Image: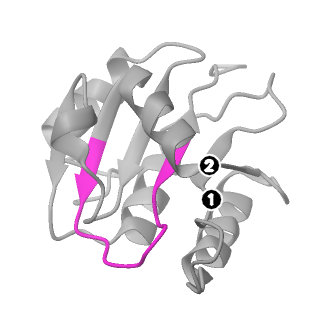
Amino acid sequence: MLIGISKLISPELLKLLMEMGHGDEIVFADANFPAASMARRLVRCDGHPMPELLDGVLQLFPLDQYVAHRVTLMAVVPGDKVETPIWGRYGEIIQNRTGLDTPFETVERFAFYERAKQAYAVVATGESAQYANLILKKGVITGQ
């Protein structure tokens, strides 16, 4: 354990976050996502809810300031009658940690899968909300 780092962030996840460079992407996958078959590098965070993990990560992880969309969500499949209240929770966390009001883009399910295959890493969580998957694009640390 370290001071100021969420206890949800494992040493393996912390190492991956540090290894990533500007523009690299990391997927935070819900419990239904095929993480093991998609990941170039897989980090298991089973049992952890995504909002708390996202909050802990965004205390350490700068989002890319040079792109229009720093966060990508998997779009609801047309005709699927699923509500996505978790997206609002993500928005609150992102705004609190970064000041961004509308950070999201949504990407069709299979396009999301293809992007996930190219991501630096996939973090498999225990999040049970549907369509809770998201991709973060890493930025740079300035003024340090």
Image spot of residue 75 (x, y percent):
62, 59
Residue 111 placement, left or right of 52:
right
* Residue tagged 2: 108
- Residue occupying the point 39% across, 49% down: 28
The reply to whether residue 1 is visible in this rendering is no
- Residue occupying the point 42% across, 33% down: 116
**Residue span colored magenta:** 123-135
Image spot of residue 126 (x, y percent):
22, 68
Q: Is residue 70 above or below residue 2?
A: above
- Residue occupying the point 15% across, 38% down: 11
For mark 2, does the 10 Å Cα neighbourhood hold few (<14), some (14 to 19), or many (20 or more) residues?
A: few
- Secondary structure under badge 2? loop
* CB within 8 Å, label 1 to label 2: yes
- Secondary structure under badge 1? loop
Image spot of residue 143 (x, y percent):
72, 19
> Would residue 126 be counted in the magenta stretch?
yes
* Residue tagged 1: 75
Number of the label disc, if any, that sits on residue 51: none
